[in-house]
Amino acid sequence: MAAGAGSALLRTKSLERLNADAEAGEHTLQRTLGPWSLIGLGIGAVIGAGLFSLTGIAAAQHAGPAVVISFAIAALGCCFAGMCYSELAGMIPVAGSAYTYAYATMGEFVAWIIGWDLVLEYAVGAATVSVSWSQYVVRFLHQFGIDLPARLVHSPFETYTLADGSTGTGLVNLPAIVIIVAASWLLMIGIRESARVNAIVVAIKLAVVAVVIGLGAFYVKAQNYVPFIPENTGTFGEYGWSGIMRAAGVVFFAYIGFDAVSTAAQEAKNPQRNMMIGILGSLAICTVIYILFAGVLTGLVHYDAMRGDGAPVNTAIGQTPFPWLKSLVTLGVIAGFSTVILVLLLGQSRVFFTMSQDRLLPGLFSRVHPTWKTPYRSNLFFMVFTGALGGFLPITQLGHMTSIGTLLAFVLVCLGVIILRRTHPDAPRAYRAPLVPLVPILGILTCTAMMVSLDGETWLRLVIWLAIGMAIYFGWSRRHSRVGREQGA
């Protein structure tokens, strides 16, 4: 019995079967995305509020001006992982991302863990971002004299203070629900339409970031870069090189999302070529933007002055004679959040679509709309689930789990490349990650180092989340597995 159970956990899905399922009848998604659409999806997911918030936090608490090194280290880990993602996405152009790759290399149980793990990155991440999107929209409307009822912008577990000093309890965070519903509706009616809207909003937020970097660069003060690497305080993670590594783990959250490009592999034209361009192209563009932005921010304001500052970018803009930049930054954050939510919900629906095809989840998640050619029921489910999280729960703590969950997925994707090079050395590869196994090993080491640098509470939340996932797998998924039933037959 034990041996049978062990073999069930390790059962894999062949590359031929994966590619055949991608083109199977009623479950076929429409291939409409070109390389620029994929790059746009990557930038849409990566350039978000992390650019405007995490940069100041990481500089003030951990790395000082050397936060630019932290961004480079985080990008290096992403680059190693991105090359591995590109190879696997070209070999296996199927929706599902890291879940699908794990199923082909490490077995069903590891694939389930990754699929469950991606809920942290995509669904819970989108819900967390929707709450922040709501806060920025309320702030932006207030600048024009428009104030929404306080009870309708706070969850039932939040209290608020009015201008007259009185306090109250929220009813529902309505704007958070609105953006989740809008993004889900757009995803349901078509991937082409979603990509077009994403491209427009991405252009807006990149323009905002370019204006902030371009104008701010003229007011940088060289003395703010001294010392470039502040001396460690004696506590791990507080300045020095340990602080740079801790900051890399923190700002890594700002890079999360480029891997969502791989979830659209089943909807990409010529995925063997375009997936590599979409993943590595978006990552390269975002890395340059992050390093330039961090350099300008820490040059405008001394890192120590940003400690405890809830709006470090606004403080930095205060060093320039352009007060209108604050409103522009708020608009950029709103645009950034909007595309992040859109792409994260896209990724989550595609992961569940593929897991449903494998019957590790109920079949409703793999139903494709006859006209829209999208997994609309999966979109509907996450519209309700994610909207409820964003509208009724203060889920900011769950947001801290996103980075460590994504790093774990990256480690397993890098490991998957090494395994497939051994088990399928002659399989067609439109893109080959260079210097294998060196590059995947470096990706594993870099991502593991960033995971280790995160605090103990984050690790505890990850363990609890994975324990819940294992209970679902052993309680339902393992018995209904499509591969398991076929092998049993």
Image: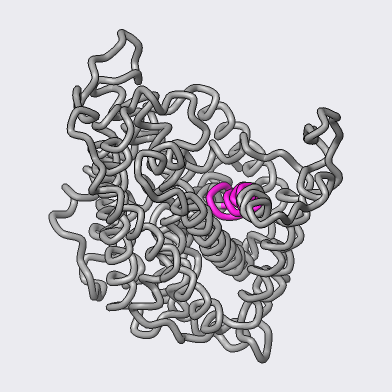
Q: What residue occupies the far left of the structure in this picture?
A: 435
Q: Where in the figure is residue 35, as x and y percent of width and height?
A: 33, 78
Residue 156 appears in view: yes
Residue 46: x percent and y percent? 42, 56
Residue farthest to the top, as pictured: 234
Q: x and y percent of residue 213 in the render? A: 30, 53
Residue 364: name its quadrant: bottom right
- Percent across and percent down for residue 56 are 40, 35
Colouring of the image: one colour
Name the chief secondary structure element in magenta: helix
Q: 313 or 409: nearer the eye?
A: 313
How many numbered marks have been drawn onto this rendered protein structure?
A: 0
Work out which quarter of the rendered image holds the C terminus and state it.
bottom right
Q: Can residue 124 be seen at all in this image of the molecule?
A: no
Q: Is residue 20 left or right of 245 when viewed as pictured?
A: right
Is residue 171 depicted above or below 456 in this figure? Answer: below
Left or right? Give the position of 267 relative to 449. right
Closer to the camera in the image, 162 or 113: 162
* Nearer to us in this view, 27 or 306: 306
Which image quadrant: the N terminus?
A: top right
Identify the image quadrant of residue 420: bottom left
Vertical placement of residue 127 versus 19, above or below: above
Residue 424's place in the image compared with 250, above or below, is below
| Residue drawn 24% across the image and 48% down it | 217
Identify the residue shown where x is 35% and y is 11%. Answer: 235
Chain part drawn in magenta: 119-134
Q: Which residue extends farthest front? A: 321
Residue at position x 76%, y 60% in the image = 384
- The answer to whether 209 appears left or right of 349 in the picture is left
Does the magenta portion include 486? no
